[in-house]
Image (cartoon, rainbow, N blue to C red):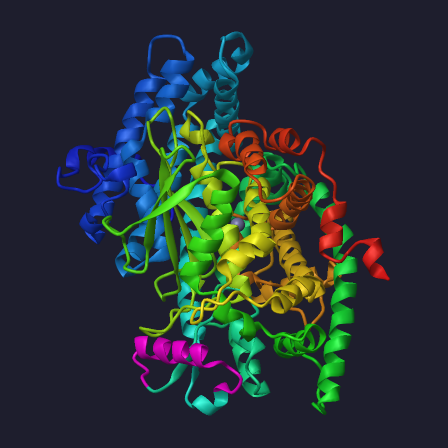
Amino acid sequence: MLVGAPLQDVAADEAALPAGNPFATPSTLPYRLPPFDRIGNDDYAPAFAAGMAQQRAEMAAIAGNPAPATFDNTLVAMERSGRLLDRVGLVFFNLASSDTNPAIQKLEEQLAPQLAAHRDAILLDPKLFARVDALYRQRDKLGLNAEQVRLIERQHISFVRAGARLAPERKNRLRKLNARIAGLETQYEQRLLAASNAGALVVDDRAQLAGMDAGAIAAAAEAAKARGLSGKYVIALQNTSGQPALTDLTRRDLRQRLLAASLRRGWQAGATDERGLITRIARLRAERARLLGYPSHAAYALEDATARTPAAVNAMLAQLAPPAVANARREAADLQRAIDAEGGGFKLAAADWAHYAEKVRTQRYAFDESQMRPYFEMRHVLEDGVFYAATRLYGITFKRRTDLPVYHPDVQVYEVFDAAGSPLGLFMADYYARPSKRGGAWMNNYVDQSHLLGTRPVVVNNLNVPKPPAGQPTLLSFDEVNTAFHEFGHALHGLFSDVTYPLLSGTNVPRDFVEYPSQVNEMWATWPEVLAHYARHYQTGAPMPQALVDKVLAAQKFNQGYATTEYLAAALLDQAWHQIGPAQVPQAAQAEAFEHAALQRAGVAFDPVPPRYRSTYFAHIFGGGYAAGYYSYIWSEVLDADSVDWFRRHGGLRRENGDAFRNKLLSKGGSVDAMTLFRDFYGAAPDIKPLLERRGLGAASDT
Ligand SMILES: [Zn+2]
């Protein structure tokens, strides 16, 4: 039911967790790695029920404590609460993303409203808030250290933003909205996975795949086999509008079929229709924002980000959109010339972009993507590239562990050691795509670092690399290499966390800040010493020829008009859905017209460049996490470009530089205000110029 779960039911289950349940006690494995080999589908529901009951009881004890509120008996006690719920929740939601199944999906849908209600039961408890509020008011007079004061401030903001100050009847309305939104977001995610799987392109005949390399064709045959379609070929859909195969496919009709399948995801009536869900989610979020006293969900969400207001976000996007689209139009003209030169006789369309961009790139820089792949074998990229850069910068080392249980045979586990050889944490690499994994790439924690709880971090990176048939090497595209470095930047943020309180640990920072360290880490993918170390031919071991390296580097600004425009279009769509009041949210049948009008209005409606995500498959914003926050990537890129500049000015890949970044910024997690951390590291306020230059949007590049 999509209403607040009756909390008495949860309490009744309190004593129901059998001792044999793998979540009943903390894991005894190294780093408290979850005992994946002992976890079954039936273990989650009782552990969640008991975990919620346990935390409710703990919070009730804190709220009902007759002694006056102190930092220890309130804030610290809250931080210590909910251990069981944490253990089961981290495993469950990680696996719901990376290796789901029908049982997990069903439970996920049941749990979403229950967990929203659980959170509300804590954050809307007037007695608990009174204690937090009392401490907040005297926080400077309690003799606390900076992290402790920060904990009070962050916890206080969580309560206020969750509605702790609302009148009781408004709190009731809020509880219902939260539960309904959580349920709908889960339905949206599950339907999207179904839509993406259903949209995969089935090709009967190998000849149609002309242009694809042998490895990709083998992967497509393998994917078909996995779906019971032996003898055929399946091109699975990636999350984004653009699909990697569009680069290679020479048959225009097949490119058009593939792009259409991608762009149509979730728009068609039937079991995978997302239109009703996205409009309901947008409307309910807008209603909730009104209830909390904000004109829109964006106003509410941005207040707690470094951007602060929709106006600030709009100003930045408006500054970037016109030059980006102008760039894309210039690039389109180049592509049209390439089409005309080969007597194509058609007008450039979105399905042609990647294919002809690749041709122009090949002509202009005299190399194509497929020449690079043999130098990007997956394991080499990870161990001799991603890890190597981290060793050079931070002195950390990695040891593969094959003795620990994993949730899927494709997962690789590494133990990470600090420079002095002391243990730091565990890193799990889950790089392959599979139908049970949602699209995209992401980092997450299985265990959060905290001195209070005595825990070291266990982090995972998920990618979606197509798995080659057994015995074949996994050769990455340059994009995938970059993604591996990006996600490892998040992993470092988690691994280097050195804080006391779990609420402030690792990547618990504003979401328009969290992408910044990961983007900085991308710079090492093409750093000459790093590239030379990992880019070796998978058969001969020969380094990538310098001429090819030079071309790769020269080509980095290529196609930036397209990349920036497709990104900005998605970011603007996100704002369009979330900067409106409930009455302005369209009905499901008008969702497509709404999307179109939003792109037109923002000046980014340019048919050959569809938004990176269309509304129906925009999981960042409708699955939760990044609602009104997709702008974060380019917002953080300002800080990223400045920091890349800083590293360059200070000699690049050096221990001193890595240590400065780690000590001043990465290790602090959310224990210090985000922009203060940036200024401590960078030594100045952010400057937008390096970003404009990188994206080819500056005045200088307009010539
Ligand atoms: Zn990221």
Between residue 19 and residue 557, name the one nearer to us: 557
The answer to which of 603 and 274 lies nearer the viewer is 603
Q: Residue at x 44, y 65 (%)?
A: 377
Q: Position of residue 461 (x, y in %)?
A: 42, 51
Using the image, determine if residue 126 lies above or below residue 522.
Answer: above
Query: How many labels were placed on the picture?
Result: 0
Residue at the image position 48 percent from the left and 59 percent from the top: 440
Q: Tell me if residue 213 is in the magenta stretch.
A: yes
The quarter holding residue 482 reads bottom right
Q: Which residues are magenta?
A: 209-230
Location of the C terminus by quadrant is bottom right
Q: Nearer the viewer, residue 483 or 621?
A: 483
490 part of magenta stretch:
no
Question: Does 122 sit above or below residue 396?
Answer: above
The part of the image, by quadrant, that contains residue 289 is top right
Q: In the rendered view, does 559 fall on the left or right side of 251?
A: right
Residue at 57%, 30% in the rendered image: 664
Residue 641 visible, this orientation = yes
Q: Relative to 502, say whether 545 is above or below.
A: below
Expressed as whole percent of the image width and height from the top left, the position of residue 102 reads 28, 61
